[in-house]
Image (cartoon, helix red, strand yellow):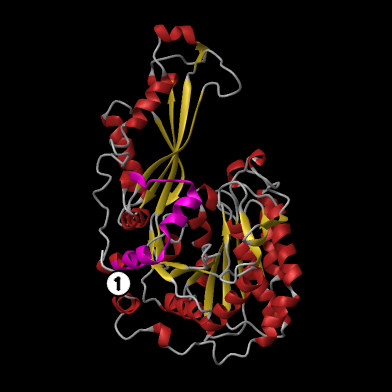
Amino acid sequence: MDHVSRRDFVQGTLGAGMLLATAPSALAAQQLGDVYAQIGNGHDASVVRLQDWIRQVTIAAENRGMEEGCRYMMQLARDAGFQHVERVPTRGFPSVFATLDAGAKRTLGIYFMYDVKQVDPAEWSSPPWEARLVDKPGLGKVVMGRGAVNQKGPQASFLSALHAIRAAGRKLPVNLVLIAESEEEIGSPHFSDAVLAPQVRSALEKCSGIFMPEAAQSLDGTVQVSLGAKGVVELELVASGEKWGRGPSIDVHSSNRARLDSPAFHLVQALDTLIDAKSDPAIDGWWDKVRPLSAAEEKMLDVAAARMSEASAKKSMGVTHWARDADWRQALEDLAARPTVNIEGLVGGYTGEGGKTVLPHRATAKLDFRLVPDMTREDAVAKLKAHLAKRGFGDIEVNVSGGYDPTTTPADAALIRTMLRVYQAEGVDPIFWPRRGGSWPGIVFTGEPLKLPAAHFGMGHGQHAHAPDEYYLIEAVNPKLAGIDGAVRSFVDCLYALGA
């Protein structure tokens, strides 16, 4: 595809005449030297705050540390200056709701999550709950631990920005409404309970938008501004002799395979119908509601393909080929716009050391689906069940654990324009991205009834979310990357820009 110039892209995406790179910075009139000094003075406290938070284990999938994590999140909010902090019960684990009234003209919503993914400590080079400072060659000093970058590092840096502003004797330039959920890593099954609680909804309705802190910088220092995220459905498929009416209802000796059907193979055969020969989703009607990319979104991907490194992307994931042998531009489009059917794990029978000759009576597959506009969680699950039933697999249990619809915020939303201006003031020319391949429950904000713009923002770097050796950069040796102090400063700048 032809290269699209930055000017053509901005005009096509944000509207003619809105060339933000030439607009005067909203920060130019601000004198923030005293706040920046407090960021440096508070460096050690910022690092310790993050380390201590990582050590507070909170895993929704294992019902581990949930009440303790809630209380910890509440204390973090109080320490950062929120005057009102409360635990909001849901049908699952609780959320935390907090408000900070600075007497400002504008109010900003902040989204946090305080749960993290499970870990296998044997896979880590540094214990995942110790939050050690580790030197990474060519990168600098990092905090390594579960939740370091997803999301405790960026969130702790945002809280440090609030501490720095207060330490400088200033009031915040915006009022804040914080909603922190505890079930993001299990598909946010009850988050809407908290968001739509009367006191929370009333406060969010006063907000100009929703802001989720992140560490947006890639290894080369580039930043992506995502205008949305895919939706997700998390579920498990369970095949059992009891439900099927064939095969054993208890594990039996494998010699009986000669005369008994296998629930495990029954599950494998069902899974095989979910994809075609190219491993693309083949669930009946799966593509019916997939919205084509707009011309503006196509331009975004053209720019991204020209500016982003394919070699670096492949190296970071240890791959040599993209699915369907796609080229780089197509791979980026697939990440942003292609729905998926993915097997997270398969469990059945004996999986320990050596062999154990059994015929298992039950087998489970854990799956996730990524959804794009105009797909919905409800429709995706209904199509899966109908697809299985039509092919003789109606006995297989479909147990949905969480999920939500895709989310989108317009490129010309004031929240996006302001964040773009802050990045540019930092010397960063962001790459616009139609939709991140991962998911977050932004639809509860951008959809009915709130219909608020929502976006991610933040300098800083980290990697290996959901994987071993997850880290967040503290002190960078690469001048293109921001360490924790630079990340804190970016949040200060963004708050003042939004307040202006």
* 115 or 135, nearer to the observer: 135
Q: Residue at x 57, y 85 (%)?
A: 104
Label 1 is placed on what type of residue?
A: Val
| Residue 318 on the magenta span | yes
Magenta-tinted stretch: 299-323
Left/right of residue 62 with respect to residue 8 in the rendered view: right
Image quarter where the N terminus lies is: bottom left
* 424 or 164, nearer to the observer: 424
Q: Residues within 10 Å of mark 1 (few under 14, many from 20)?
A: some
Determine whether 105 is above or below 288 in the image: below
Give how far across and how far down residue 88 sits, in percent: 60, 59
Residue 118 appears in the figure: yes
When asked about the image quadrant of residue 213, the answer is: bottom right
Q: Which element is circle 1 on?
A: loop
When asked about the image quadrant of residue 304, the answer is: bottom left
Could you tell me what secondary structure mostly forms the magenta stretch? helix
Determine which residue is flagged by label 1: 4
